[in-house]
Image (tube, coloured by chain):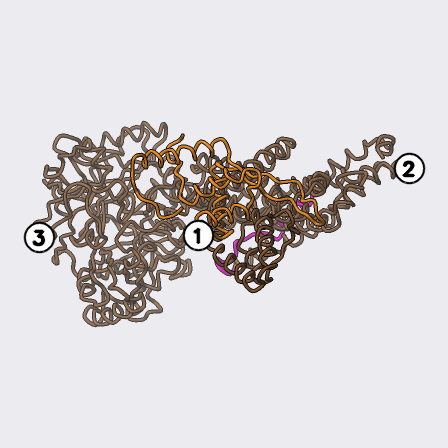
Chain colours: A orange, B brown
């Protein structure tokens, strides 16, 4: 992985939610996923701005779904990890888990 | 789950609008859809909570989205990407511009050549003017430096009324409050001999010790003069110019502190000046402290030049007023010496550049000439471009139809013009560099200047700006016209290349303007030829052919008394007389046309000195026996000076015909008495001869009254032997030099010139101006002819179809030629008439400024006819070609 591809915290959340949501990863779903899992209010603008930045770094790509099967239904803009994004995410999470290895930090949730 | 979503943008309107406004365009639609989807779901449970949620989402999203947009904007605006798009477009324009030019090689080369000549003429003239009139003086705060003169109105025009001062005047002026400091100088020839080397004559500036500090100038080596060295008897020090240091001292860096012999006495070198330094003019090659001795510089010795640095904020007027007040006090103290004098304060440049006003007038004439040439060039090129752009209308229309905006098309056309102008500027600068030698003789080599006459950076900038302005001028109108093409009309046209009415009117106006300016320029050239005729002997008043002059300055150390000076002059003359082929020899203190003059007051004995009406001034020279014979100046009455006119004999004078006619109305005047005043001394002298009028020291002053005094009775240390000889000039010069060296080996003898050379040099500036203006005139005629030819040829090309039809129904060759030539005739005739009127205007202006230049009526008229004839020929050629058109071919082309 190239040096300097550092992922910010919120970027990690966005990428992880893409993994969780798979084909259903579009703006509103991503926003809700992060909000529900972190119990923090997340704005849709934050999600789109972050996705945009990740797309600039070629970590994510977008694709348009078929129009929804209702009157006036529109295509949705879906997002998924690029191979490079996948690798970067693994690397970051791997580092974190290696740092956590053998530590007893206690737990504040779950 | 979102499957039930009725996906449309819903949500409270103001917040939805805000969200739409802040979102990056790419994210706008999906983001609003997402917001709408969730909002709809929430609306089903709690409408108020849903609206609040929507508001909070938008408000919290805004900073993120704005930051994102700013990032995107900065990324798109980054210099690299901006440059990239500009450079890409520019390169594209340049590439297609070059393709466009290459598709019309003859046209392109013609335009470049015409433009390059126009730019070259202007660049060369600018380079000429720059060091003389424009470049800042290389001194500290030059705007505060002034030169002060006493003036005498009786000396007439051209600024030759400026006189030097006496020591007492200089000392009184030093006290003036207007000046931070006042310094003085004078100059003259001295002989310099390095410790092991030959003596050379060097023009030397004698300066007060404060002069260089006042200018703000330090020697490159050594130091300035000290105040203690600026006193008589203690001033045996010199500062060398860079050129003397290099030629006579081998650029020895250890020269400071060494001893040299100046006029035979030992002096110490204290400094060497920078190469560019020239003061008060280019031929001064050494400086010595003035060390004014009050014994030698009495009130009558008026030979000091004075300059000063004004205090901050003091105007020339204030300074003049203060010097005027001082002057009035002095006039009461020395009434004789200050008679008829006033004061003047001028900027330093005007004082240092001899002929400043005349040169400025000449250069202005050249600049106007070059500017007019450029105007014709622009008109010409605009016309060519117009014809070209008409041909390209289809091309432009196709581009327009394919979606090129008008701005894009104009830019493309302007790029082509700029390319032409740019190439022409490079060619023009090259031509100016090559041709600078042609214009340089306008300025005498020895004249004061700042730097060299060369095509330097400002000149290059000047020509590039000129080229850019030209490109805009000749390019914009045709470009705008071409871009305003009606797409459908042009594309529907079966025959490309017919111009609209407006284009034709514009083209006609250009031809008219060209013919006017060309006629005027030719007229101006003819007028200048009329004013500056070739100077024949008759107009000079002497015969320069075969005359050699030997300049010499007898140093005080070797020739302390007047008797010794006269004895040497006599000895030298006898020596030269014995040389083979020598017909006559003489002596004069100042050669005619050698840029130096001196004058004297004169009156009849019965007239009173106080009466200003009868105080007249004449050119004064001191001449030895044989001078008039050696110069070929005819003696009309009486005799020239001879051995009788010794120092202790009765005072005598020779006058010229003009003076004799003024005072005695042409009667026999030998034996009459004339009172002459010079050097503060009044002398009654008997007229022993009258000679033919001849030009004095300044060619521009023309013929005036002249008084000649015998050298024995008005001796000078410096002057010239004149020698008329037959045979080879080079041999005569060598023999003369050897003879003088034999008589006094210490006397420098390199200032040996032919009188013919002096005449040439004196008239070279004005002759060069005349030649340049004539060149401009010829160039203007050629350009105008080319312009008319272009328009006529274009008209023929456009009317080929019409000509074919006319010929098919029986028009004769003469008919066709008539039709084509008539299309240009009217406008050419009108232009020529206006041009002729403009020439008459110029002559009227010159007449009021200089007196009747004597240009016959026929000259402007013939210029008009010349232009008309050339234009007729230029339109006849394409007309002839038109008649060779085969009607069958033209008609079949439809």
Residue B504 visible in rendering: yes
In this rendering, which labeled residue sits more in front, label 2 or label 3?
2
Nearest the eye: B272 or B12:
B12
CA distance separating discs 2 and 1? 98 Å
In this rendering, which labeled residue sits more in front, label 1 or label 3?
1
Q: Which mark is residue B33?
A: none
Disc 2 is attached to a residue of which chain?
B
Q: Which residue position is annotated with label 3? A: B228
CA distance separating discs 2 and 3? 102 Å
Nearest the eye: B591 or A27:
A27
Disc 3 is attached to a residue of which chain?
B
Q: Is residue B463 left or right of residue B596?
A: right
Q: Quadrant of residue B54?
A: bottom right
Nearest the eye: B744 or B340:
B340
The quadrant of the rendering that contains the C terminus of chain B is: top right
Based on the picture, tell me whether residue B730 belongs to the magenta stretch. Answer: no
Based on the picture, tell me whether residue B862 belongs to the magenta stretch. Answer: yes
Q: Position of residue B875 (x, y in %)?
A: 72, 40
Circle 1: is it few (<14), some (14-19), or many (20+) Cα within 10 Å?
A: few
The lab-note entry on whether marks 1 and 3 share a chain reads no
Find the residue positioned furthest to the right: B809
Q: Position of residue B506 (x, y in %)?
A: 68, 50
Disc 1 is attached to a residue of which chain?
A
Specify which label sits upstream in the sequence, 2 or 3.
Answer: 3
- Specify the principal SS of the magenta part: helix
Q: Position of residue B162 (x, y in %)?
A: 31, 59
Residue stretch in magenta? B848-870
Q: Which residue position is annotated with label 2? A: B810
Which residue is located at x 43 percent, y 43 percent? B459
């Amino acid at each position: 992985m190239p040096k300097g591809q550092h992922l910010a915290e919120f970027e990690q959340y966005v990428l992880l939610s893409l993994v969780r949501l798979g084909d259903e990863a579009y703006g509103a779903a991503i926003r809700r996923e992060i909000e529900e899992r972190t119990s923090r209010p997340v704005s849709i603008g934050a999600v789109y701005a972050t996705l945009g930045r990740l797309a600039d770094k070629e970590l994510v790509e977008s694709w348009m779904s078929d129009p929804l099967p209702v009157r006036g239904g529109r295509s949705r803009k879906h997002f998924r990890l690029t191979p490079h994004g996948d690798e970067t995410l693994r690397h970051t999470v791997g580092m974190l888990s290696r740092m956590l290895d053998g530590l007893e930090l206690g737990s504040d949730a779950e | 789950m979102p499957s039930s979503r009725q996906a449309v943008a819903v949500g409270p309107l103001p917040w939805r609008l805000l969200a739409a406004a802040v979102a990056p365009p790419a994210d706008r639609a999906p983001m609003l859809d997402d917001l709408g989807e969730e909002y709809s779901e929430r609306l089903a449970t709690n409408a108020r909570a849903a609206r609040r949620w929507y508001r909070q989402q938008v408000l919290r999203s805004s900073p993120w989205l704005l930051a994102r947009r700013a990032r995107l904007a900065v990324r798109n605006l980054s210099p690299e990407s901006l440059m990239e798009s500009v450079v890409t477009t520019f390169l594209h324009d340049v590439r297609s511009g070059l393709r466009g030019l290459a598709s019309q090689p003859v046209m392109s080369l013609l335009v470049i050549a015409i433009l390059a000549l126009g730019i070259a003429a202007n660049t060369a003239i600018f380079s000429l003017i720059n060091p003389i009139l424009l470049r800042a003086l290389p001194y500290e705060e030059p705007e505060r430096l002034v030169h002060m003169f006493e003036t005498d109105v009786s000396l007439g025009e051209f600024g030759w009324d400026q006189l030097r001062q006496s020591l007492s005047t200089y000392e009184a002026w030093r006290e003036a409050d207007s000046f931070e400091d006042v310094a003085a100088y004078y100059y003259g020839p001295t002989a310099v001999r390095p410790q092991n080397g030959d003596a050379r004559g060097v023009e030397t500036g004698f300066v007060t010790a404060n002069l260089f500090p006042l200018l703000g100038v330090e020697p490159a080596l050594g130091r300035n003069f000290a105040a203690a060295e600026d006193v008589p008897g203690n001033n045996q020090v010199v500062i060398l110019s860079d050129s003397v240091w290099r030629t006579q001292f081998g650029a020895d860096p250890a020269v400071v502190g060494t001893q040299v012999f100046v006029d035979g006495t030992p002096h110490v070198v204290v400094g060497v000046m920078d190469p560019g330094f020239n003061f008060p003019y280019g031929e001064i090659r050494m400086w010595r402290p003035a060390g004014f001795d009050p014994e030698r510089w009495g009130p009558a010795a008026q030979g000091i030049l004075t300059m000063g640095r004004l205090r901050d904020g003091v105007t020339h007027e204030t300074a003049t007023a203060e010097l005027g007040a001082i002057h009035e006090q002095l006039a009461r103290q020395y009434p004789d010496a200050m008679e008829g004098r006033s004061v003047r304060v001028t900027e330093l440049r005007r004082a240092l550049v001899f002929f400043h006003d005349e040169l400025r007038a000449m250069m202005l004439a050249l600049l106007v000439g070059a500017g007019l040439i450029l105007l014709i060039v622009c008109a010409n090129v605009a016309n060519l471009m117009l014809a070209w752009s008409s041909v390209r209308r289809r091309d432009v229309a196709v581009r327009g139809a394919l979606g090129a905006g008008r701005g894009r098309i104009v830019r493309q056309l302007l790029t082509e013009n700029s390319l032409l102008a740019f190439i022409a500027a490079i060619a023009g600068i090259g031509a100016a560099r090559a041709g600078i030698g042609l214009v340089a003789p306008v300025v005498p080599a020895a004249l004061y200047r700042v730097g060299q006459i060369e095509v330097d950076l400002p000149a290059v900038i000047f020509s590039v700006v000129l080229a850019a302005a030209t490109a805009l001028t000749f390019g914009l109108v045709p470009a705008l016209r071409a871009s305003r093409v009606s797409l459908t009309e042009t594309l529907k046209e079966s025959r490309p290349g017919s111009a609209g009415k407006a284009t034709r009117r514009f083209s006609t106006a250009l031809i008219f303007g060209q013919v006017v300016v060309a006629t005027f320029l030719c007229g101006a050239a003819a007028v200048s030829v009329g004013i500056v005729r070739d100077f024949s002997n008759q107009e000079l008043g002497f015969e320069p052919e075969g005359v050699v002059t030997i300049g010499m300055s007898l140093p005080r150390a070797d020739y302390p008394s007047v008797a010794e000076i006269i004895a040497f002059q006599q000895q030298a003359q006898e020596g030269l007389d014995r040389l083979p082929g020598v017909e006559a020899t003489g002596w004069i203190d100042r050669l005619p046309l050698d840029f130096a003059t001196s004058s004297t007051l004169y009156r009849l004995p019965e007239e009173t000195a106080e009466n200003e009406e009868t105080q007249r001034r004449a050119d004064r020279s001191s001449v030895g026996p044989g001078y008039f014979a050696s110069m070929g100046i005819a003696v009309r009455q009486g005799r020239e000076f001879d051995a009788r006119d010794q120092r202790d004999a009765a005072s005598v004078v020779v006058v010229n015909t003009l003076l004799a006619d003024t005072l005695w109305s042409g009667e026999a005047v030998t034996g009459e008495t004339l009172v002459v005043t010079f050097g503060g001394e009044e002398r009654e002298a008997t007229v022993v001869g009258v000679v033919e009028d001849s030009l004095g020291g300044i060619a521009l002053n023309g013929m005036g009254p002249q008084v000649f005094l015998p050298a024995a009775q008005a001796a000078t240390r410096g002057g010239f032997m004149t020698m008329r000889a037959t045979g080879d000039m080079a041999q005569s010069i060598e023999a003369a030099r050897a003879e003088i060296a034999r008589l006094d080996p210490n006397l420098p003898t390199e200032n040996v010139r032919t009188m013919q050379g002096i005449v040439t040099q004196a008239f070279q500036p004005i002759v060069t101006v005349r030649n340049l203006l004539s060149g401009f005139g010829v160039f203007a005629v050629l350009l105008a002819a080319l312009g008319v030819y272009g328009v006529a040829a274009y008209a023929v090309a456009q009317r080929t179809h019409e000509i074919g039809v006319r010929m098919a129904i029986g028009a004769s060759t003469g008919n066709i030629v008539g039709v084509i030539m008539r299309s240009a005739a009217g406008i050419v005739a009108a232009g020529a008439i206006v041009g002729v009127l403009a020439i008459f205007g110029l002559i009227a202006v010159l007449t009021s400024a200089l007196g009747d230049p004597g240009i016959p009526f026929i000259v402007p008229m013939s210029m008009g006819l010349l232009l008309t004839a050339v234009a007729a020929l230029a339109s006849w050629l394409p007309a002839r070609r038109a008649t060779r058109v085969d009607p069958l071919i033209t008609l079949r082309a439809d």
